[in-house]
Image (cartoon, rainbow, N blue to C red):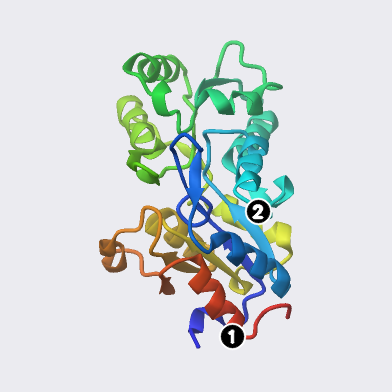
Amino acid sequence: MASWARGVRAVLLDVSGVLYDSGGPEGGAAIPGSVEAVNRIRQSGLKLRFCTNESQATRSQFVHKLQRFDFSISEEEVTAPGPAAKKMMQERGLRPHLLVHDDLLPEFDSIDKSEPNCVVIGDAAENFSYQNVNKAFNVLIGLEKPVLISLGKGRYYKETDGLKIDVGAYMKALEYACDITAEVVGKPSQNFFMSAVNEMGVKPDEAVMIGDDVVNDIGGAQRCGIRAVLVRTGKYRPSDENHPQVKADGYVDNLAQAVDILLASGVAGH
């Protein structure tokens, strides 16, 4: 039996690249076996949380899309960076200049955006024009104490037609230009993983993270004391298994195989 499966009571699932690949006219495609794998996790009695850095849609839109792919998922089970950033801004009295995808804008409808005192950057896709990035730079450089909040720090992700550059590259550009360090909301931030674990009422060493990003999913979870398993789907590349800093607790061909191993270990429902 795989040692990473021992004593697991809760599963944290990355979404893009593990459950489905985004993109295309249909909004993406479910990865074979993943719909059934989620159902089997539920039937086993294991606690379940979906941990995504998705920032191209509100949490509600995102959940509806996954439901269209036949995934059993509810909004309350999703830990996403948009709502976490909104909460942080409300607590700190921050008024954002938003450099995000148009579909994410409704997430921040209730937030005051007049006279911005911070910049929020997400996976803005086509909105990452020179003009828009430069506008965010000008807001930051004009602040006495610039605050840059980034919804994740991924380098790239996979869509059905290939790899796409992610928010982390633009975050780094603004950090460099303004000589600041962004506050990351989402993976690999410790607060993000710990909020998911705490919501399930388990200890970090009772949970396993399953993801396709060796740095943000695997490394981020392990820094919180959560075991982490890398799937060979999504953005996975063979070189990830020889990463100089991060070594996953296990490697599986896909989510279905990870669930096979978990259920064979007899941990479910305990």
Q: Amino acid at mark 2?
A: Ser
As shown in the figure, which amino acid type bears the numbered disc 1? Ser
**Residue drawn at (72%, 71%) of the image:** 43
113 vs 66, nearest the viewer: 66
Instruction: Residue lying at the far top in this picture: please name it.
Output: 115
Q: Quadrant of residue 162?
A: top left
Secondary element at image label 2: helix
Tell me how far mark 1 sits from mark 2, CA to CA.
Answer: 26 Å
Location of mark 2 (residue): 195
Residue positioned 68% across, 55% down in the render: 72
Q: Residue at x 63, y 44 (%)?
A: 68
Q: Residue 48: give x, y in percent of width and height.
A: 67, 62
In the displayed structure, 96 sits above or below 123; it is above
**With respect to residue 264, does 96 lie above or below?**
above
- Image point 54% across, 68% down: which residue? 226
**Left or right relative to 99: residue 239:** left
Does residue 212 appear anywhere in the picture? yes
Find disc 1 in the rendering and name its residue. 265
SS type, badge 1: loop
Position of the C terminus by quadrant: bottom right
Quarter of the image for residue 6 reads: bottom right
Q: Quick check: 174 above or below 219?
A: above
